[in-house]
Amino acid sequence: MVTAIDAMNVTLDSIIHAESWDDASVEAVHRAMAADPELAARVWAWVQLCDHAGRNVDAAMPPLDDLIARAMDPTCSSPAYASACAMHPSLERVVDRLADDITAFDSAWNRSIKQPATLRRVRFVQWAAAAVVVAAVALSVLLLDAPDSIRFASTSGGSEVVELQDGSSVRLVDGAELIVNPAFPRQVQLTGRAWFDVSPREDDPFSVTTDHAITTVAGTTFGVEALLESTVVSVVSGNVLVQAAGKTVPLNAGWYSRVVAGAEPSTPEVLSNLSDLAWTGLFIFRDTPIDSVAAILGQDFKVRIEVDRSLSTQSLTGTFDRDQGLEEILGVVVAALGAELQTIEADIHYRMRAAPDGD
Amino acid sequence: MDRLEELTKRAKMGDPESRNELLKILEPVMRGFFISRIGLRSDVDDLVQNSLLRVHRSLADLKDDTRLKAFAMKGALYEMQDWYRGRYRAKEDLFDAHHPPENEAAAFSPMDRLDLQKALDSLSPKAREIIELREYGFRYEEIAAMIGSTEAAIKMQVKRAFERMKDVITVMLLLLLRTW
């Protein structure tokens, strides 16, 4: 957070801590100093002291090339750098930050230069604000002058949650990549697999474009697997439109459709087993019987989870992140049921049972 | 020879299309880098443009065509440092350090007679480090991350550093007055 000075409340503290100055704040400081000579003297002293500190560092500063060389190789130390650091150890922090800059550049290079051809050849088209998304389904689109586009990516085998400007979130898994243009934050492009939780906005549809299809939603939770030869769209809640090869297919909650390259979306089929969405890294339960919840969690975490007969008629609706860990997930489940969790043997055997009366 | 190396070679030889293609390839790299370091700010466009200009103007200096990445990175790092160093220019609008404000109390500037270096030397190494990093151009939030502290703690240390320096100045002033 950048600390700006409050023109209505000029104090020595606010001046010392200010990090941004505009004409109004400068004028406010001058007025305050004119009205308070002691403040003026202290501010002047502060400015001179900081200026002197800065000049000291400038005078000792080695060439930037020396700092960069040191950042790239900690064993490399020019005489100028060694001498400067002896006088001003703060330069080591500058070098550390340069090392972070170098790592960031390396990542930016790898994202942009070493991408597969299908990702590099992506073009942004300006969408109409409220109309159904209209775009070619053809695979080849060029990355043009989209200077504001941002790429997000997850590592291979890992996951990354991206929070978008409109409050929607996207969970990228296993090397997936998402491209967002801040000017059109609800129109994204995807390669790989991602789970979308879209903030509802009836007047501004959210669209996901892959190499094979465009999926448009108003607000819902759904998964998109943009694979090499096809795109699969699975809807857990809400509804979406899947468009490809000139045909638009509506998908409701609990259904999925597959789009093969160059073809129309397949006839929707029931998403019979939400565990098919395990690739999202999430446990997704929709009116799922508790016995099934226990079985799914037990299988995934390789533990035994018993459910008291008194609870087995209940069902659960909720989404959990695998990274939360088993005990935290079970804690939430039993809280939702008004039950309690008994740990018979940690990481091996658990039981969900009804809470005793009076709890 | 890979495509990038070939493009670099032709660009250095003066082929304008190759040069444009090269800069077009570098643009998203620069943009991604600057956004990752400073966020989505309006300065990013200027930083990207200036970095590409550096590459464009100094491409002839690149000896090894396989080293485009390191060459481009250096340009970006130079721009990043210039941006940090330029962030407190606005503060100079408060005063020019060599022309004190027209104010009767400040006209008698104790700093004219005192040793600024002695005042700085009175600081603890950590406080001095914070003051120097601030004068280098880093914000409190960045300094906090660099030294493993919080922004609030950094600001408190800055305030205490000033109080410490001011106390030293006050003592020295008294000593000065006594010797007159």
Image: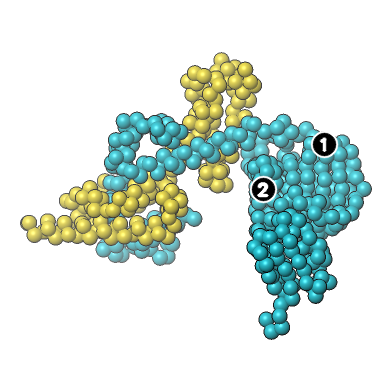
Chain colours: A cyan, B yellow
- In the displayed structure, A308 sits above or below A94; it is below
Query: Farthest residue in the bottom direction?
Result: A358
Q: Which residue is mark 1?
A: A229
Q: Position of residue B31 (x, y in %)?
A: 58, 38
Q: Is residue B162 left or right of residue A295?
A: left
Q: Secondary structure at mark 1?
A: loop
Give the residue displayed 44% in from the left and 57% down from the top: B150
What amino acid is labelled 1 in the image?
Answer: Glu
Q: Quadrant of residue B52?
A: top right
Query: Farthest residue in the left direction?
Result: B180
Q: Position of residue A299 (x, y in %)?
A: 76, 56
Is residue B21 among what the camera can see? yes
Find residue A159 and name its label.
2
- In the displayed structure, A196 sits above or below A359; it is above
What amino acid is labelled 2 in the image?
Answer: Ser
Give the residue displayed 74% in from the left and 33% down from the top: A118
* Residues tagged by mark 1 and mark 2 found on one chain of the structure: yes
Q: Is residue B57 left or right of residue B162?
A: right
Specify the subunit that label 2 lies on: A
Give the residue displayed 34% in from the left and 56% down from the top: B158
Q: Earlier in the sequence, mark 1 or mark 2?
A: 2
Point out the frontmost of discs 1 and 2. Answer: 2
